[in-house]
Amino acid sequence: QVQLVESGGGLVQPGGSLRLSCAASGSIFSINAMGWYRQAPGKHRELVTLISRRGSTNYADSVKGRFTIARDNAKNTVYLQMNSLEPEDTAVYYCYADVWPSGGGRFSDHWGQGTQVTVSS
């Protein structure tokens, strides 16, 4: 079993900042990519950002220059620093990890339970 637990969501005013964290735990042999997706009401889930094990990153155009992803491989943890938040950033943010479980198998997708981010005055 692999669990992803997010923290750090909440309510923030436009222009403000939030930092999300996601820790992976359980029967983990290796983690490839980690990242964040989000889903706003009435919309499909969309990619926000991904980071490879070696630190290569990619971002959705809508968050470039405002959001920064980082990871700590020793802690199996990924972070998302969100600055200059806009009302359009309001969504449930889901942590993602491509995990190879202990005991063999293959890499497969794992998701956190989601954390709400609301940007409003």
Image (tube, rainbow, N blue to C red):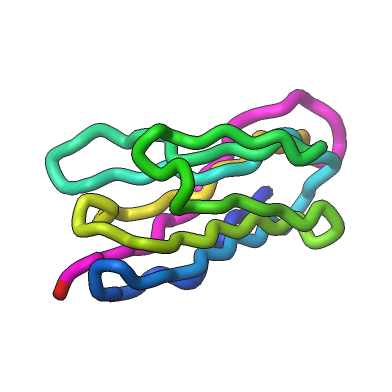
Q: Which residues are magenta?
A: 102-120
Q: Residue at x 33, y 61 (%)?
A: 85
Please state, as top left, top right, bottom left or bottom right, where the C terminus lies in the image: bottom left
Camera-nearest residue between 105 and 33: 33
Q: Residue at x 35, y 72 (%)?
A: 16
Q: Residue furthest top?
A: 106
Tell me where residue 29 sits by quadrant: top right
Q: Per the image, is 38 magenta?
A: no
Is 93 displayed left or right of 29 in the figure? left
Q: Position of residue 47 (x, y in %)?
A: 43, 34
Q: Residue at x 70, y 58 (%)?
A: 77
Q: Position of residue 38 (x, y in %)?
A: 36, 45
Q: Per the image, is 117 magenta?
A: yes
Q: Residue at x 45, y 41 (%)?
A: 64
Tell me where residue 5 sits by quadrant: bottom right
Camera-nearest residue between 38 and 15: 15
